[in-house]
Image (tube, rainbow, N blue to C red):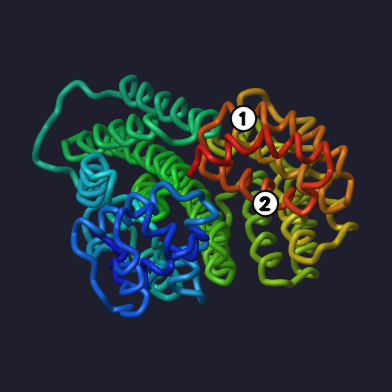
């Protein structure tokens, strides 16, 4: 089942601190006595009974994204992981179809009340990198032909499945997770069932490629729904399926998704190792567009590691690779990485640096890049558009351009209201918190009043 939060008195105290509640207020919200809350704090190793643990599950599930992030940091200040998580025992040894069957069945049946307990931690460090690197460097699995036969599955049916996978991928940026995520997982389970039956090698390769794309979409949607652990396991499944399909380039794209997740969790050292592993594994199989995308992930890691020279030089390499792009030879799954995505990604990373250093010059550079992204975003990419707009608001706030920040903020909220994305919710909460220091300015007060219902809705 993976890592679980053991609800002890120490864990409860960490949650109360993350929520910013006094002992009395926390007792009222929890429906327990004040003396009980005090006991939990005094006796950190006290294990809660099932009823109290369920209450804590509910409080954590209702917390804002920033409160959940503070909670994970509180229970392990050295890392955003709650504990050292591990891969399931058979992740890199069992047949991919077995891994997929177990994962989709677990996902579709999981008790929503348990989500917060089982899915916060991701695998990081040596437990993440060593098994993955060893598996990638081993001999590829052969496409085994099972004994059961299923007549009538041909390339036309496979192409219909692949078209469905493309539609689901488009859903991700338009809508995020939610109920649509379950539809993707259900389709993934169906494709996996087909792979347990007998087909010609070319059909099996196409089915494996389809499973890889569906698993990657399930990973992105799970992450966007706040289910980090599930997302990482779907990414791992997608890598396995991509290798079975003999598609090194897509495997690298999936690894880049894992890299982005690690960077969102502030694990830049692991992310840098993983992006280099992806570049090495897929060397010679990548189009310039895909190379440019991987360079932006590498630059992102350097930015988080506080290495500005490496950051800027790697951004230059991303620009140079993208200049050689030819979308007519790009696979459909990398065509999202256009000039808007390049500008938005680099602009977002410059904004990270400006936020950390309070640097107005870097904030202005970030705003220039983000502005290019806003101008050239294709219609329908709601999550990306929302993140662009919120990024521009934050850049203007750092610059001290409050009126302009508020003007953009009202436009941003129109986009935010159209997407149910945990990533957008986290960004919105961050921007809302940043506006707090300007809460005496009339325009900022008006913007905050409009933002608050959206921020509160994630609680």
Q: Is residue 184 above or below residue 251?
A: above
Query: Looking at the rendered structure, which numbered label has been put on residue 166?
Result: none
Q: Does residue 148 appear to the left or right of 383 in the view shown?
A: left
Query: Looking at the rendered structure, which numbered label has been put on residue 381?
Result: 1
Of all residues, the one furthest to the left in this rendering is: 147
Q: Is residue 316 above or below residue 412?
A: below
Q: Classify mark 2: helix, strand or loop.
A: helix
Q: Does residue 5 appear in this view?
A: yes
- Name the one closer to the observer, 34 or 349: 34
Q: Does residue 323 appear to the left or right of 141 in the view shown?
A: right
Q: Earlier in the sequence, mark 2 or mark 1?
A: 1
Q: Does residue 243 appear in this view?
A: no
Circle 2 packing at 10 Å, graded few (<14), some (14-19), many (20+), is: few
Instruction: Give the x, y percent position of residue 77.
Output: 51, 75
Circle 1 packing at 10 Å, graded few (<14), some (14-19), many (20+), is: some
Residue at the (39%, 41%) spot, across then down: 218
Instruction: Give the x, y percent position of residue 144.
Output: 20, 48
Q: State which quadrant residue 371 falls in.
A: top right
- Number of marks in picture: 2
- Name the one closer to the observer, 220 or 26: 26
Residue at the (78%, 68%) spot, across then down: 308
Real-space Cα separation, disc 2 to disc 1, in angstroms: 25 Å
Q: Does residue 53 appear to the left or right of 249 in the view shown?
A: left
- Name the one closer to the observer, 19 or 325: 19
- Quarter holding the N terminus? bottom left
Residue wearing tag 2: 433
Residue at the (32%, 57%) spot, across then down: 56
């Amino acid at each position: 089942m993976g890592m679980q939060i053991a609800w002890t008195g120490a864990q409860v105290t960490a949650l109360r601190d993350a929520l910013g509640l006094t002992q009395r207020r926390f007792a009222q919200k929890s429906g327990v006595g004040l003396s009980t809350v005090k006991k939990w704090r005094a006796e950190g190793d006290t294990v809660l009974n099932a009823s109290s643990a369920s209450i804590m599950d509910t409080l954590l599930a209702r917390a804002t994204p920033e409160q959940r992030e503070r909670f994970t940091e509180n229970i392990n200040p050295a890392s955003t992981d709650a504990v050292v998580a591990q891969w399931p025992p058979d992740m890199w040894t069992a047949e991919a179809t077995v891994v997929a069957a177990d994962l989709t069945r677990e996902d579709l049946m999981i008790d929503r009340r348990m989500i917060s307990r089982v899915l916060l931690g991701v695998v990081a460090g040596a437990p993440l990198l060593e098994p993955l690197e060893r598996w990638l460097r081993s001999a590829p699995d052969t496409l085994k032909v099972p004994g059961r036969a299923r007549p009538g599955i041909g390339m036309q049916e496979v192409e219909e499945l692949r078209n469905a996978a493309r539609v689901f991928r488009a859903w991700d940026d338009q809508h995020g997770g939610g109920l649509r995520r379950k539809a993707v997982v259900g389709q993934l389970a169906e494709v996996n069932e087909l792979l347990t039956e007998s087909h010609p090698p070319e059909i099996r390769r196409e089915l494996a490629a389809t499973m890889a794309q569906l698993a990657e979409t399930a990973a992105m949607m799970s992450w966007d729904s706040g289910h980090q652990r599930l997302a990482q396991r779907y990414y791992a499944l997608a890598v396995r399926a991509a290798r079975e399909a003999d598609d090194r380039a897509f495997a690298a794209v999936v690894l880049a998704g894992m890299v982005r997740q690690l960077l969102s969790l502030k694990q830049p050292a692991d992310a840098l190792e993983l992006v280099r592993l992806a570049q090495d594994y897929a060397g010679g199989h990548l189009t310039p567009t895909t190379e440019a995308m991987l360079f932006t992930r590498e630059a992102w890691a350097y930015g988080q590691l506080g290495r500005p020279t490496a950051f800027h030089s790697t951004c230059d390499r991303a620009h140079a690779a993208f200049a050689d792009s030819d979308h007519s030879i790009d696979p459909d799954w990398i065509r999202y990485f256009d000039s808007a995505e390049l500008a938005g990604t680099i602009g977002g990373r410059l904004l990270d640096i400006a936020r950390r250093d309070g640097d107005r010059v870097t904030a202005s550079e970030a705003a220039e890049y983000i502005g290019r992204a806003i101008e050239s975003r294709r219609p329908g990419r709601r999550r990306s558009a929302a993140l662009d707009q919120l990024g521009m608001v934050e850049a203007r706030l750092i610059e001290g351009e409050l009126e302009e920040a508020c003007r953009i903020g009202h436009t941003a909220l129109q986009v935010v209201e159209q997407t149910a994305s945990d990533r957008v919710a986290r960004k919105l909460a961050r921007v809302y918190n940043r506006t707090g220091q300007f809460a005496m300015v009339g325009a900022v007060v008006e913007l905050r009043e409009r933002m608050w219902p959206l921020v509160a809705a994630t609680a």
